[in-house]
Image (cartoon, rainbow, N blue to C red):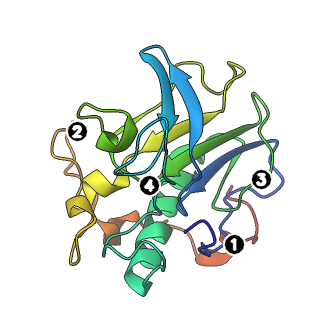
Amino acid sequence: MLSLTVPAMNSRPGAAQTLYLDFDGSAPFAWSNSTGNFTVRGPNSTAEFPASVPAFSTDGDFNNFSAAELATIDHIWQWVAEKFSPFTINVTTVNPGFVFDSLTMTCLVAGSVGDWYGGTAGGTSSIGGFVDGGSNTCFVFSADAVNNGLPGGRLDPPQDIVWGDHPPPQPAELAPPQDASWRGGGAACD
């Protein structure tokens, strides 16, 4: 599960700050925010006997990424990289290998809200989580957005998000307006 290979994508290689989009799941770990202390874990487990958080999946196979899942990961990365493009931060799928306040943040795109957090959140973070001395991790509960990870599932935009005057983006609309030379270690976005 943790050995899945996610394509290496970087929006601003060499930038001082990094947002790491983690799609390959995670070993259990302790995390806290203003609502409490949690053991981040996978399904059908307890804080005392935690299981690993499964990888991102749209087809229920948590051990392999299909071509469709890799395309979805690419679209998600493009979308996030575009949102952070005004800032000097590298949005990447490559684990930076370290966690330092004000330098690195991990966004775990995997698992379900019901695995450990509870409630109906599509994701969560700690206010000040980039600088608070904690694990510098936020979460997107992707299993809840993908028909509960069942075969044939698809990534649907959440219906409860307010998109302003625009309809929710569709995967084909997430492609950047520039050529693809900036992906995967190419030149940084301008």
Residue bearing mark 4: 110
Residue at 34 percent across and 48 percent down: it is 112
Q: Are marks 1 and 2 in contact (CB under 8 Å)?
A: no
Residue bearing mark 2: 161
- Which disc is residue 184 wearing? 1
For label 3, the crowd category at 10 Å Cα-Cα, with few meaning under 14, some 14 to 19 and many 20 or more, is few
For marks 3 and 1, give the CA distance.
Answer: 14 Å
Q: Secondary structure at mark 1?
A: loop
Q: Mark 2 or mark 4, which is nearer the start of the sequence?
A: 4
For marks 1 and 2, give the CA distance.
Answer: 30 Å
Q: Nearer the viewer, mark 3 or mark 2?
A: 3
Q: Secondary structure at mark 2?
A: loop
For label 1, the crowd category at 10 Å Cα-Cα, with few meaning under 14, some 14 to 19 and many 20 or more, is some
- Which disc is residue 96 wearing? 3
Q: Are marks 4 and 2 in contact (CB under 8 Å)?
A: no
Residue 101 percent across, percent down from the top left: 76, 28
Left or right: where 161 falls relative to 97:
left
Q: Amino acid at mark 4?
A: Ala
Q: Amino acid at mark 1?
A: Gly
Q: Mark 3 or mark 4, which is nearer the start of the sequence?
A: 3
Query: Would you place residue 133 above or below residue 57 in this image?
Result: above
Q: Secondary structure at mark 4?
A: loop
For label 4, the crowd category at 10 Å Cα-Cα, with few meaning under 14, some 14 to 19 and many 20 or more, is many
Q: Nearer the viewer, mark 4 or mark 1?
A: 4
For marks 4 and 3, give the CA distance.
Answer: 18 Å
Left or right: where 82 falls relative to 185:
left
Q: Are marks 3 and 2 in contact (CB under 8 Å)?
A: no
